[in-house]
Amino acid sequence: MTMDTSGVQQIISALGVVYDPKSTNSQRHEAQQFLETIKTNEESPFWGYQLSLPANNGKNYIVRYFGLSLLQGSITLNYHKFDSLKSQAIRNWIIELAWKIEPDDPHYIKEKVAFLWVSIAKRVWGNYLIKTYNNKENHIPAEPTANSTKLDQESPEVSPVSPQDANDGWVSMDSDLWKLWNNNITCRELSLIILRTLFEDIYLLDDPIASKRSVILNQLSIFIVTPDDVLNTIYESNPNVAMCKTIPNGWFKIWSQFLIEILSTNDFKSQTCQTFVPKILSTFKTCLHWVQPSVLREENIMQTLINILTVPDVKWKTLAIDCLHILFTRNYNDSEDFDFFIGSIFSTEGINKLRQFYQSLTLDADDVDEQVYSLLKKTVEMIVSLSEYLNISSKNKISWEDSDIDNYLQLVLSTTSHPSLIISGLSLQMWVTILRFDELSSKQPIMKLLLDLLEIAADRTISFTLDEEHISKKFLNADFDSTPDANSFLQNYRKFNEDIVRITVCKIPEDGLMWLNNRLQTFFNSELGGKCINDYKLTEKCQAFNYGTSQFNIIENCIRGISRWRIWYNDDDFEVINDRLNKLVESLGERLLAMNLASPLLIRKQVQTLVQFAPLLKDVSPLMFQVLEKILTTATFEYPEGISDEEKELIRDLRTSCGTELNRLAYIMPESLKRIFTDLENVIANILSSKKISDHENVAFKSFLLVIASRSTINDKDEIFAKIVDPELAAWSAPETEKGLLDLHWFMERIGIVEIASYFQSRGITPTSDLLEVKMDNEGRLLKNRLKDHWSSIFPIRATRIFIQYSIEKLSHDSSEYLNLLKLWKPRVQPIIPHILQLLTQIQAYHNPKNWQDLPQEVQSFVKYSCMERFWQQGVSIQTKENFIEENVKAALTLRDFADSVGHLIRYTREYAFLTMGSLSQLEDTLYEIPNIAMMIWKSVAGDTAGITLHSWKHMINSCLRIVIKNCPIKYIDVFMSELLPTALNDLDDLIVTKWKKIYSNGLQLLEETDETLSEEMMEEHMLRQLTATVVRLIMDIVGQYNSKTLTDQQFACRKLIIENQQVLAPFLKICCHIISIKDTKCSFNTILVVRNILSDILLKNDEVDKYLCDYLMKSLIQVLTDDYFVETHNEAAIAFTTLYCGLRSKNDYPARVLIQLLPNISTQHISNFETLLVNSKSLKHQRSALLELIKLSKEQGSGLGNMFDEMNNRTKELEIASAKKKKSAGGDLMNDPFIENGALGNLFGE
């Protein structure tokens, strides 16, 4: 069996063509075709061996790698078919190739040889053990754990092993590795790579081959690594297992002692050290979590690792920290082991070593060394992970008396104050957890540092995005490529720091308030504080506004901390302390109220902060009435003459904000305000009659009185309600309103299109005119001002929504206040619901170009302009925010302002109409008892969607559809949802599928998203991803997800409806199947969880449904499983698929036939083997592994040559994901989320 020279030469030539950049596509294709035929030849394993031998192809690594790939293909695809002789031959070739590895062979050749060795080991090593157990269950003992004492107390009877079985089970593998270790230095290196790879597959990766034999592979791995004297304390003697082992001391001792030996030379730059230290440490990483602690102690492994931290090699130190992290977070059942590893690191000496190492890792923010930075992150993560042992109620805990807790906490605190926010953020969850756990936070070491922690957290509540020179911003730039990811992280980071401020003040309220008083005194007496007080023209990006706003946020969180203290504290001296706190809070409020700020921006924040004092002071101090006076005064803040449009906008925002705060005050203290209600009525009547406020602002003052009357025990509340509400609602039935809603023509006339058209004609505007080039004249300004007044009261939608929402906000539906409001609202709003829906119908029709055809050409052009959505959104908009604002300011001076203003009116009105439907849905059956209301709603929001943008769809779903579905009373679920869901889900499915087809045809843009350079196509894709995520949220609202902790009564009812009603189930499954295969990992993953939640209830209930699941759900899941884009979704998709397949396959063979069609290169024999594995699998995990193996087979059968580095890169990524999951399951960084597209921070569905 030899390969002739010409054949070898043909392969070498073909490989040369494939890898030669000068080859034409046709030449390359022809060469690849030839090489594919070689791979399918029965002799390919032998040819692979011949090509791989250094003696044959020396430094032609492309040829040798191809030879190794031929061997790999034969093992992966055909090894189970080989007889004993052929299996033995291939194994011997691989052993020989390992022996003949050359010192200067590149890393990928060594890794590939190791991979082949492990590929066989995973399949056969120890398989004879299955036959040797004759107990009733016919299985080998359960796998041992790292801390077990005696596994087989009742050792099953075993039978002797035949020489053939022993040979087939590679009984000599450990011996072969030992010979390799002793052969030469290169083979020694390879032996480490082999065992590291094997342990990665068994313990870290979800390897389908290793998973099937995990019990045997676990047991044998522990046997060959552990010394015999330790094994004797774990296992009863078993000669059949023992025959697999060659080295009495076990591999761990061999590695540890060799590591100490080479380190003792102190020649760290030698080839031996540079080769073996990282290799041994990498192998340690795969086994430290399961090697017996007694072995680790005997080898003093912790000290060895700590010593490596002093060596000037960042890579070694990083690996040593990884190993220490494993040692510090693994389980120790024996108290002596726990004290040796965990107790010793909590000693003064241990903490000092950690501190010294942490302090040695210095960084230059202007030129960040990425390797050192990565090491620093890992070091801090390891230090923070030790906090798990502070928990006094935990099974594994350290002694607070015998440990140097003070120094440990100071060390963590120093990491919290690090200028890198990523480093700082690693400990924030720890502090919040400690503070929330009373038994911990009351301990003296914690109490001693609370004020220091408070200061650090308070300092970190500023915005870090504004000052490019701030050291933390420089680190942030190094950490994040994407602005949305950075913003998401910063949002979480600030929340944690605000939590720390709030809870710390709760724990030490008096000290906290005195600390706050001193902080405010210091800040506002500083130069920066002086600017906050005196500078009128502060901007949102200036330093004074940033730091000034931060002080107000700190005040708010301190006040919330005092409110929390009132709930939490229950000692006998509560009243005494509470009185003292009230005086301190009142004094703080008085100082804040007395601050005479110049900037409208900061006055707005001042007012918002003052309202936060109300829950504490509403019943004990007259201060809140002074605050009320301040709000009323500020809500009518005068517009100085001659100010710019930008300044006008700031004051308008201030006045609007005060209207909101006024209503917040009414929520908080209605009974207190009831006492002065008549006075408030008079004050507000004077304000309204003064004409100093707009119709827009008018509503906030009226709703303020409405909220007080609705929520207090005031007399005549029904009369007050009618006096406030009825005049506003009457506008719906006004003839001009009803006429304006009648059809699109009247609607356009009502909003002023006819007047604008007349004016445009007088200015000579044509369809080709650029409105940005035509300046606004006096006539235009007068018309615009007149229309603005008209627009503010054109449709009473805003008042309707605000009155309903503000009056019922957060009221229990069982409360007398709510029930009375329901009685008042129901007869009033039911007649206007058709008007609101008609308003939505006309707005949607306004956006459809087909409806403009009867308009003059120049008006059509204007309407088209008005339908263009002009908004700025972080990470979506192409231009910068500054350029967007500048463009808007310029547009305001031209005729384009008419189009922008009408467009704003239309969208603003539509938004309030959506919100109003959401508010109406909170009035029990008021909305839902109307006949055919579901279709009336859907027709109004989605009946005419020709011009509706993705952004508008998303907004409609979030602010209207999801709310209406969530609030549907249980008794109306069957009727309402049966009517709504089939049409809505079908329409949404059509929309998403159509839009994604367009994106695919253009090519995905956002696989590597850089928001700074978003093109129109990228912007469209970004918006489509947001819309798809919103639709996923919608279907999650309807039925929930698999393993959801809580499902609402509505979700249970909807789930029952969908399961039982095929008219609803069909569109529901259709949209789910489509979303699962859409190229968006988050959406795919979440939709699979939704489907899993109903799968068991719809399987095998109906033939038609089963066929649909076979034809479409199986197809979608296979699409996900065969695409590496969805790698983070593969596990969940595999579980869903195996559940589905096992259920359907029990009925007939149709699923098997479908699966063969879906998976290329798969035969009926492959399916048969797969099904045998499914039947014999004892867990979902093993079933999943069987499927993943089948998928892998399919992909490998059809794969081309590929890149020799791809395999290694993919494996590295898989290991990183596995490592991250392991840390997360052990309580890792809670500021991260695993399912973030192209990033690790933020939250997909955060609301």
Image: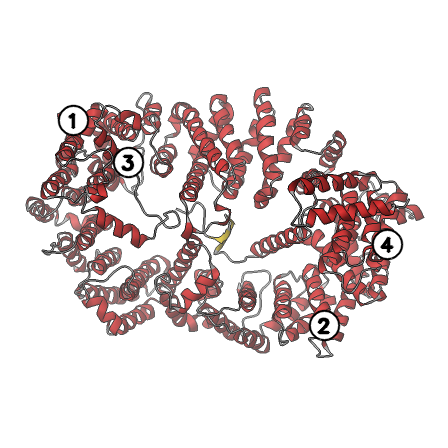
431 vs 217, left or right, is: left
Residue 1165 or residue 1207, whichever sits in front? 1207
Indicate which disc residue 899 carries: none
The secondary structure type at the circle numbered 2 is helix
Viewer-nearest of discs 2 and 1: 2
Classify 10 Å Cα crowding around label 3: few (below 14), some (14-19), many (20 and above): many
Classify 10 Å Cα crowding around label 2: few (below 14), some (14-19), many (20 and above): some
Question: In the image, residue 228 lies at what x, y percent?
Answer: 83, 63
Query: Which residue occupies 75% across, 42% down?
Result: 35
Residue position for label 2 = 273
- From this view, report whether residue 654 is shown above or below residue 7: below
Residue position for label 3 = 867
The secondary structure type at the circle numbered 3 is loop
Label 4 or label 2, whichever comes before in sequence order: 4
Question: In the image, residue 30 lies at what x, y percent?
Answer: 71, 39
- From this view, report whether residue 70 is shown above or below residue 832: below
The secondary structure type at the circle numbered 4 is loop
Residue type at mark 2: give it: Cys
User: Label 2, label 1: how many angstroms apart (C-alpha)?
Assistant: 88 Å
Indicate which disc residue 733 carries: 1
Label 4 or label 1, whichever comes before in sequence order: 4
Residue type at mark 1: give it: Ser
Label 3 or label 2, whichever comes before in sequence order: 2
Residue type at mark 4: give it: Asn
Indicate which disc residue 238 carries: 4
User: Label 4, label 1: how many angstroms apart (C-alpha)?
Assistant: 91 Å
User: Label 3, label 4: how many angstroms apart (C-alpha)?
Assistant: 80 Å
Badges 4 and 1: C-beta atoms under 8 Å apart? Answer: no
Classify 10 Å Cα crowding around label 1: few (below 14), some (14-19), many (20 and above): few
